[in-house]
Each structure stands twice: as C-alpha cells, then as structure tokens.
Amino acid sequence: MTTWDPSQPILEIENLSISFFTRLREIPAVMDFSAKVMAGEAMGLVGESGCGKSTVALAVMRDLGKNGKIVAGKIKFKGRDLVTMDDEELRHIRGSEIAMIYQEPMASLNPAMKIGAQLAEVPMIHQAMPKDQAWALARQIVADVRLPDPDRILNAYPHQLSGGQQQRIVIAMALMSKPALLILDEPTTALDVTVEAGIVDLVKDLGHKYGTSMLFISHNLGLIMDVCDRLCVMYSGEAVETGNVTEVFDMMRHPYTQALFRSIPLPGADKNSRPLISIPGNFPLPHERPNGCNFGPRCDYFEAGRCNAGDIAMDPIPGGDRHASRCLKWAEIDWMAPPAARVSKPKSPIGKVVLKMEELKKYYALSSGAFGGGAKKVVKANETLSFEAREGETLAIVGESGCGKSTFAKVLMGLETATSGSIMLFDENIQSTPIQKRNVDTVSSVQMVFQNPFDTLNPSMSVGRQIVRALEVFRQGKSDAEREARMLELLDLVKLPRAFAERMPRQLSGGQKQRVGIARAFAGGAKVVVADEPVSALDVSVQAAVTDLLMDIQRENKTTLLFISHDLSIVRYLSDRVLVMYLGHVVETGTTDQVFQPPYHPYTEALLSAVPIADTKVVRKRIVLEGDIPSAVNPPPGCPFQTRCRWKSQVPGGLCDREMPPMRMLEGGHQIKCHLGAEVLAGMEPVIKAAAE
Amino acid sequence: MPDMLSWPMIIGLMVKQFWPVWAALVVTFVVSIRFKRRLGLYGKLFDSPVGMVGFAIVMFWVFTAVFAPMIQTLPPLDQFGSAKNPLPGAPTPDGSPYPFFLLGGDHLARDVFSRMVAGARQVLIIAPAATTFAFLVGITLGLPAGYFGGKLDTGLSFLANLVLAFPVILLFYLLVTPEIRNTGIPIYLAAVLFIFPVIFCVVLLNGRYRTNPPRRNLYVGVTLVFGLWAYSGLAFNMDPLGVWGMEPNLLNVFVSVVFVNAPTVFRIVRGIVMDIKSRDYVAAGQTRGETPSYIMMWEILPNARGPLIVDFCLRIGYTTILLGTLGFFGLGVSPESPDWGSTINAGRKILSMVPHPAVVPALALMSLVLGLNLLADGLREESLKD
Amino acid sequence: MLIFVLRRLGVMALTALVLTFVVFYLTNLQPNLEKLARSEGSVRMTEESVKVWLAENGFAKPVVYRYGEWLGVVPGWTHTDEKGTTRGRCIPQGSDPAEAATYCGVLQGNWGFSTVFKNPVLDEVAGKLGATGWLMMWVMIVMVPTSLIIGIIAGMREGSRTDRVLSTFSIASTATPEYVSGVILVALLASPMTGLSPLLNEWGVIGSKTLFQGSATSAMDDITFWNFFLPVMTIALYGIGYIARMTRASMTEVMTQQYIRTARLKGVRFRDVVIRHALRNALIAPFTVIMLQFPWLLNGVVVAESLFNYKGFGWTLVTAAGNNDIDMLLGCSVVAVIVVLVTQLISDIGYVFLNPRIRLS
C-alpha cells in the first residue's frame, strides 16, 4: 500500500460525472461533482430523491451496475484513484477500507445466513482471520453497537430481529474491519423516529471512537445537522452548495438551499400566520434539464439570458470555511430579505362536533404460528379510544409503527368493525356498520387520503376516469357530461392542469398523484377526511405544497381533517389538536400548544426529542429511548410505555409495572395517561428551546 | 413421371408454397415496427429480439392455419397411390393435383406436408380456445378465492389441488374414452365449465355499470342472451339456431384440457390477487363503497394482466403439448384427423425405418411451442422494464 | 412442526380418498362394466344376461358401496348360485367360503386380480414399479444436477452471453415434450435409415446398424448405456429445461437482492457471493419445483415406456387402460396418487427446512 499522509483528504472526488445508459439515450445522473472528506470528518449529502446523492455513494463503491458508468472525473481514496482500479484491488478496499450502511436493513442481510457468519465473514476475507477469532470479534462488535445478549444474536437469523436491531447489525458489519470511510445511505429512513434517534447517537459515538470518516446521505436536513460537520446540497445531479453545516444553515448562498429551508416546517412556522413556501414547479427529469442553472425555472431570482446562458461552475464564497455555491447571483441577492410570497391566511373558525368516538376498542384474534394451530392470541390494536373532532378542525393522530393509528382509520372508514364503543358521525352511530351497509351519504362524507402516492391510484385507469368513478359511486351529477365537468373542476381544485384527466398514473410524479388522491377523496363533498401520512413519502419541497393544498381545501369546505402522522414537525405546523398514541393507547391529548409544551407524557417528551430539527438556533434535549417498540401481540403489563420510560423511577411502588395509568385531566382539557405525580409533571422542562441569542 | 426431388428443391418448393404466410408476416412486422411506440406492451415486444423471434414463429403458424387451404399441396385426408411411406420428394401418381410428396407420405400414402399444414389449423383453433376457457374459469374462481380468503379459499384451493394431484395422463385415460360419452359426464363437466365465461362477463359489466341501472340492464341483458345462446350450443349441443355446436369427441377433448388447465390458472390468479389486494387503490375502492365484484374485476384484474398475459402464452404452448399427448395415445379428436399428436402416434410404429411421417409433425409442434415460449419470455422481459 | 405434518397428512388422506373414489367411479362406469361382462362372459351376451352376470359378480350394488368393498371397509359381496356354490369377493376360487374373511379391500392388501396380466394386481404393480424405479433414478441423476448447474450459471450473470445461450437451450428443451424428443432422438440416433447411425456405420465406427437401440425392452433384464440412454434422455430433456428456467429465474432474482450487494461490497469474491450467499436462497424455489415435477415425470414415463417398449409402470397403465382392466387401472391410480401426494408433502416440509424465515422456533 502506498503511503498516505493523514493530513490529506481521505476521500477526494474531483469533477465526477456519472451517466446511466439505456437503450434509448444516455441519462446523466451526476455532473461535475466535487467533494472532499478529511480524516475523522462527517460529510452530509443532502437533496431530494433523484438528485444523484445515492449515485455518488455507489460510485465511490464502484457499484453502479451494468448501465451506470463514470464518464469523467476522479474519486481518490487515500490518494489512489478508485475509478481506474481493477476488480481485485477494489475487492480489497470494499468492506475493509470503505464500508457501507444501507437504507433497508432487512433487505441488506442475507435471510438464510446466521448473523454471526455474516459478520465474521468480513475479517475472514480481509485479514484471513481464523473462524473462531472472527466470531469472537463479531461478538465484541455486536456488544459495541449496544445490542443486548450478543451470543443469542450471533446465532439468530435476520428475520428474528427487529428493524432497529437489524440496522445495528448492519452497522456492526461495516465496522468489523475498522474502515477508514463509512458510507451511510439513508440509514434511518426505514425506522421509527425513536429508534432512529438511537441509531444516530450510535453512529456519532462510533465515528468518534474509531475515528472513521463518514459520508452521510439523507434527505433530512435535521439529521444532517445532528450528524455531520460539513454538507453538500445537491439538486438534479449537481452539487449546488457546500460548506460547513452551521455556515450553510445560517448563511445559505444558493436559492435552492434557501427554498428548501423555507419549505420545511421548523418550530415557529404556522399554517395561518407563517405558512410554508413550497418550491414552484417540478424537479426536472434527467433528460429534460434546462440550459444553464438547473434550478433556474423554479428560482425566484432567475434572470433570463444570464442564468440560462451556459454552464455554471462552483464559486467559492470568500471568508467562508470551504463554502461554495453554484449560483451566478449569490453576491447580489439580499439573503436576509423576508420571502415575498408569504401570505398569511385567515384562521378558519372551528364549528360544532362532527365526529365523536367513545370508548372505542378494536381487538383482533390472531392464530399463532406459521401453520395455524396453537393458542389464539388477541391483539389489542385500539384500547378505549375517546375523542371528538369538530367542523373545520385538524386533529393530528401521532404515533410510531404498531401504535394502532391505521387500525383506527380502518374502523372509522368501516373497513373493519369495532369490538366495542361507538363512533358518532352527525348523531348517527356508524360503529357497527360495515362499509357495504353504509348509505352513500355516509360513505361520501367520510373519505381517506392514502400514504403511498405510488399505490394510491389504480395504475391501469386514467386519472379522469378514476375521479369520474368516484363521482358515479357517490351519485354526483345527473349525466356523464355533468360528471365530466365536475371532474375537471376537481382537478382545478387540486391545482392540476385539466389535461391530466387523460393521463395514466405512471405519467405523474408522486406529488401529482397525491393531489389526484385528494381530488378523489373530495369528490363526494367529504365532511371528514382521514389523511394517513399523506406526505411522508414525498420530497420536502413537494410536502409543503401538498399540505398547503389540504389546508386550503379544508378552509374552503370546513372539512374536519384527521391527520395521521409520525412526523411531529408537520403536526405542530398544521394541527389544532393532537392525539398521541402508543401501543393502541392514547397517552396524551390536548391542543397543539398543550402537547408541545410541558408537562408532557414521557413518551411525547421522547418523541419530541427524537425528531431532528434543521435549525441551528434551536436546542434540543437528547432523550434516547432504550430498546424497541414492544410488539402489540405481546404488550408489557401495566403501563404500555413502562419498558422504555425514563421517568419510571419517579413513580413509587412499581405502580407502572402493575397498573394501567388512568387518563388524567390537566388544565384546559389537556389529558395525560401517566402515573407521575402532579409536582413531577409540573417540574418538566421543555424539550425544545430557542438557543440564547 | 418426374424424378425424385433433391432436398434443396424440396425446400425451395416449400418456401414458395408458403408465400401467403411470408407476405402476411412482412406486412405485420412492417406495420408493427412502424407504430411500435403507440402500441403499448405489444409494441414494446419489438424492442426485444427474443420476443420478435417468438412472435414471428407464432405468427408463422397462425398465418399457416389461416391460409392452410392455399398452402397445402394435396388434400390432407386423401390417399395417393398405393406405395407405403413414400420418401420426401417422391413423385405422386399421375393425375394428382400436385406432382410431389414434398415431405413424403405416410403409411396410407397421404401427403405429410399437407397434413402438417392442415394440422396447424386444428391445433391453433383448439389450443387457444381451450386456454381461453381455462383462463376464464381460473380467473372467475381465483379472484374471489384470493380476495375473500377464508373458507371459500380453503374449499376452492382443496378442489384445485385435488385436480392437480391427479396425474394428467391418468385423467386423460379416464376422461377421454369413447365409453364415457354414453354416460354424459363430459356434458356435465362442460355444463359446469362453460358457464364461467358467462358469469365472468355478467359480473364484469354489472360491477362497472352498477351506478347506472338502465345501461347496466341493457349490457347485462345482451350478454346473457348471447352468452346463454352460445352456452346451450357448446355444452348441450342444443342451440336452436344451430350456429354453436361441438362434435361430441371434440367436446370431450376440449373439456378435459380445460379441466386440467383451470386449476393452475386458479392458483396463479389467487396468488396475484392476494398480493394486489393490499394496495392502497384497492383500499380506496373499498372506502368509496365499491362492491367486491367491481374491486376484483376493475381494480385488481387489470393490474394483474402482465403476468397473466405471459402465462397465457406459455399455457397455449402447454395446451398444445397436452393435445399432442392425447393424440399420441390415440385419444385425440378422431383417428382420421391430421392434428400433430395423432400423426406422430401413427408414425411412431415405423419410426426407426421411415422417420419422416412422425418427425415432420414433431418438429412443427416443437417450433410452435418454442415460439410461444420465446414470445412469453420477450413479453415478460419487456413488461418488467416499466 | 408435528401439528403441521399431522394436518398435512390429514389433508393428504382426504385427497387420496376423494381421488381414488373418482377413479373408482370413472373406471366402474356402466359401459365399462358391460364391456367387462362381455369380455369375461361371452361376447354375444344379451342385455339381460349381462345384467345377470353383473349381479352375480357383485357389480349391481351402488357404486359407493362397491367403493367401500374395494377399500375394505364394507363386507365383500357373496353370491350363492342355484347349485349352492358360494362365490364372493373375498373367497378365492376353490377355497371354503366359511373360512374367507369378511373384509378384503385395498386396506387388507387385496388389490384385485388383473384380467390382462392374469396375476394379482399387487404383485404386478410392485414388479413394474421396480422397473420404473430404475428409469426414474437415472432420469433424476441426469436431470437434477444438469438443470441446477445450467440454471445457476445462466442466472448468476443475467443478460450475459452464457446466459443467452443457456436460456435459449432451456426454452427449446421445454418446448420439446417427450413424444417429440423421443421421436427426434430415435430418428437421429437409433434409425438405420436416417440420422447419425448410417453415417457411423459406413465409417465403421459402430458395428451394429444403429448407434443406440430404439427399444429398451432388453433393459428390463440388463440395463446398458446403449439401451437406456434414449429413454432416460427423452424424459430428462423436458425436465431439464423446466427446472433450469425456474432455477435461473430464482437465481436472477436473488442476484438483484440487496444482501447480494451487501456481500459484494463487503469484498466477497464473486464466486463466494454465488456459492455462499446466493445459492441457498436461490435453491428454495427450484426444490419445490423438482418435487412437484414427479407428477409430470409420470407423464414422461408413460410416454417413454410406450415409445421404447419398456415394460414398466407407465406401460402397464397404458395396457390396463386400453384393455379395460379395471382392478389393474385402479391399482395403478392408487400408486400414482400416493406418489404425487408424498412428493407434495416432501416439498412442503423441505421448503420449511430450507427457508429459515418460516421455520418454527
């Protein structure tokens, strides 16, 4: 191995260009990308889907597949160019010097191999370590990534572990040969927020412990701020701005970075007084990129004849810490000016109670074992759910996977019937009426917007036809012509061009599909709309546009919106009242202000602390929950949260282990399901504070 | 009397004889490639070399079947002369419509080439028709089994597995015998199997036009009248107008082949439905208050079409093989029939002495199935590329 | 696991009962029985005497009852004629009716008497199964390794030239049913008139008239490469293509999985990626397919045995079916059904063992 000076960058990417070759054309995925990662440094790559950030990571691994090719540039790792290396040399670097951590831990582990064997393989290949020694090392590293009972885990198969544990194993695998560079490709996207917080902490600690450099890829600016020292913002295959994290966050010098920050809900944003500003237009397709600045067509500062004249190079910003921007006008723009487009909207009045749930319970009988037989188990998906929702109100239902929020939606929609309790919709009890027996009015007044934009529309039916079908079913319009006209109006309502009626869903982007889904839900003049994570699968800039659209329609129609989400930032931004759920129980409910201020339920507190916030002026208390969310099949006795609660010791007599806490009414209708004493609750500190100016 | 033809001459004459097929193939390919971007999945087939080759072979046989009367040189059922098994290129007796046995003659001095061409017609009518029926039966039962699950699924799956556990050859020996016709079993089976296409169409239209009763009544009514008319003719041979009908022997073969194929289609459909029913657009249909029949027919089935089309191609090939198997064991449509399986059966006894009467239909059958398999492969590859 | 196996066994028993009943019903149709009466009695029997003959031989009872008799859960029929001699299902000719058992069906080991082979069905079937067993064994030995290797090599680098060549071969071989490949193989290798044999004979490479023997009858006594190669290849060829395609599909799918990328980016050699990481996952699907191939192999066996005149199980089945040998046909069906069901069971259990994801803890 050639000598390498540790003061030099570990990884140096110079003017890298990558293209994918299809039968029809060459599709440039990354153009003129440069970056440097020094020893021990963590570099973030941030951008929306399709911007090329993962392609860069795979290029560093030289694993672009059959169609991908590096067409220009160099990737120097410890001074050696990876681009020109042959397979054998690459093989020695992969896994030993550069290791990668992936987005989907379950898919990244071999389902038919024991964890230990998969871990031990790494030193056995690279250091020719004997098998027993390799297993011993594996055991030590598994303990290092803070997994309980390493011996059991080494002998387990991947499917026997939870998602969080699997990701820790993937991290352990990457650390087996103490690599100099770690590439993390959206390592926490598939995980719940409280689990994500634990993984992020682990990655940071291990980075320090082993002195590993990191290339951290994420779409989440908050996470980048938590983990990285430097970042590089990418847009449509190009790096548009790079620099150290605080500098870019506080003194951004590229319009895209600015627009990105304005479109994410940070504390202080409010749907009425300070609404988010979405980025107009759509992400350009790789073969339809504009001339000059790629962001030009969507940019507020666009100057025809200059910005679209020719290629634009990265321009270093004087005085910055290796800060550079790919904008011609960065020196001319007044970066401090408030956005012009921000229009505050009137707060919609909240009317009478539309929907009321009382003591709703939903249990499932589950036969255990893969082949049937065995004892029947009962899954308590929802336990005594009570709340009411008013006209024009947004009620957020917050919780992580397995908390029962989707079951609740199914019961409300009539896809399942509740075990007990009542659901009153305008004084009509619809609890035990399955959807087939509900009349058209009831069905059309309770509708749903689904989570996955790629799944929400029937792929083999045109957009217009799907909306018309909803109109037909809801008995809207007297003739085909009338329904056709109404369908076009609905497209107007969701701000889609009328020409889209003829399109097939695959010709639409994710955000556009979600708009069609919203139009379809409002086809019958819905009074109550359940939105099940409607924006979580969308890119941040599109998220803002879709949420605003929902808010606008709500204002106009006085719709009651039940917003199901795990993302507290967006909940804080748009909801009037919040319901926090954990393992089928409502643990806290109140107005948005009450829930986001102390006193908290311990779970809400942890949840708030776990959500990364992309704002350097906010200080967050770190509360990392131990372990994973228990399975709903086998919930802990007593309080459902007791296994992970950090306040448990404050409750005398082990009450938490034995008894389900009662729902306690605090002032102003704020309710918390917790055993903690009033003085303890009163003494809680806020999790999020503005840093001292 | 002319001399024996040499092999190059035989090939030359055959190529000439197939001219309508070549013409039709050229037209099909030129038109399709010209408009391939506007033809959806069919158009994309012309991006895949494998698919194109397969399509060309299949269309070769389809056109051969269509133009069979123009292509065959001698009437396929008539005997020419008394010489047994004349060799390829041998001259026919004076006064015959064509001077040569292009690919020789069989033990009854019938022209092998003409019988092969006529056989294509038989095979290409029965195999696709039987496969279509099997698909309609399999889909009509597989959709509710996959969608509702539960007892219905358990029951239907048990029945399907029952049929699948039957060795095909045994089933054929039991079902396709002349004696069984007297008992009426084929007619009962036909009565059950042939009603499914009618049910399928009625449910399909009813789901779609449920919200508009006058139109629904019209469409469903027309379907019922037409469907039951065809049904009465095909299953019971009781069509009052005499348009629809099937020979008892053909019915017997047809029913058995549908019966053997339907359970496999059922299993495939059931599997796909179980996958698709968890999609959000299905849930959207449910929350909209759609009936299960609409969701199955219009939300799920259209999105299952990719794998089903691929399997349809494969299954036509499989059915062709099954029909050949039947013919091979002398259980075919009729002993006289020029279908490939029966011809192979007739030729195999003298196989080691004079191979051509058996080898020619064998190669024909093989090439058709190969074409279908390649076509299916091409379709699968292209449909996955989206 | 035990519950699973028991439950499967229960379903299997039910399936076997239903299937044998169907076979029993279809073989005991009235026209078949009348045919039997005429062939056993005399060809010129009147309608009346056929009825009498059927009644005297226990065929007049309802079909469910007779199925019970055959199965051995209902007492066998007896008939005492005018002369006072009592005959019956369970009374062997010339023995004392008083000593005969009441029940004598399949469950008691009495499978009936073959009218064609003039031999008890059980003995006949057992002997013929032995012959077919040899054939099957060689087919498996040829088919399984060949197809797996072809499938894995084709699937490990999708789209490569090797893949194209091997895939085309497998597609071609699945397009060649046994009766086609048999015909072509014989014409090519075992005909004194066409194919290779005349050429080889002329060149003096082979002394006999044909390279391989077109008939496998001699293999009943002594299996040699020359008399067994063609029937084995005839059956194996179709299966090779089919299993190879399944394996390839499974392999290509596994090779695109993320854990294969993980392994590759760990620095594992390509060979080890295939052997250590891909193989086990890729073999789960083909294993099921191989097991479920047995019913289809039976088809192949019947075709090949008829074509090559090898007097095994398939040949017997054809002969029995062609000659209205009811007991023999029933016996063959029972064996065939049992073979199919047992392979299904093995495939289910094997699947559970190969796939740790669904193994019970």
Image (tube, grey):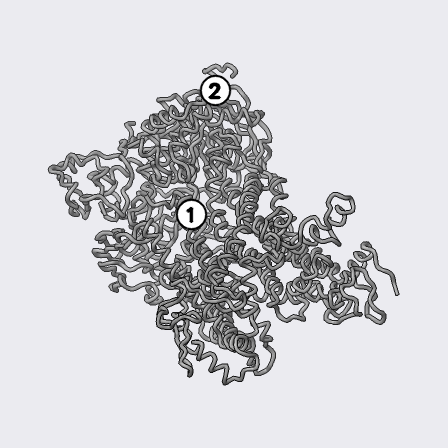
Q: Are marks 2 and 1 on the same chain?
A: no
* Image position of A74 (left or right of A385): right
Q: Chain of mark 2?
A: A
Q: Residue at 49%, 55% (x, y): give it.
A: A459
* Quadrant into which the N terminus of chain B falls: bottom right
Give the alpha-carbon distance from disc 2 to disc 1, as whole Å. 51 Å
Depth order, front residue of B234/A225: B234
- Name the side, left or right, on which C292 lies relative to A660: right
- Residue A378's place in the image compared with A117, above or below, is below
Disc 2 marks a residue whose amino acid type is Pro
Q: Is residue A562 left or right of residue B160?
A: left
Residue A471 seen: no
The image's mark for residue A9 is 2
Q: Nearer the viewer, residue C114 or B53?
A: C114
Q: Nearer the viewer, residue A362 or A303?
A: A362
Q: Position of residue C266 (x, y in %)?
A: 46, 30
The location of residue B68, given as percent across then percent down, is: 72, 66
Give yes or no for contact between labels 2 and 1 (Cβ–Cβ under 8 Å): no
Which residue position is annotated with label 1? C351
At mark 2, the secondary structure is loop
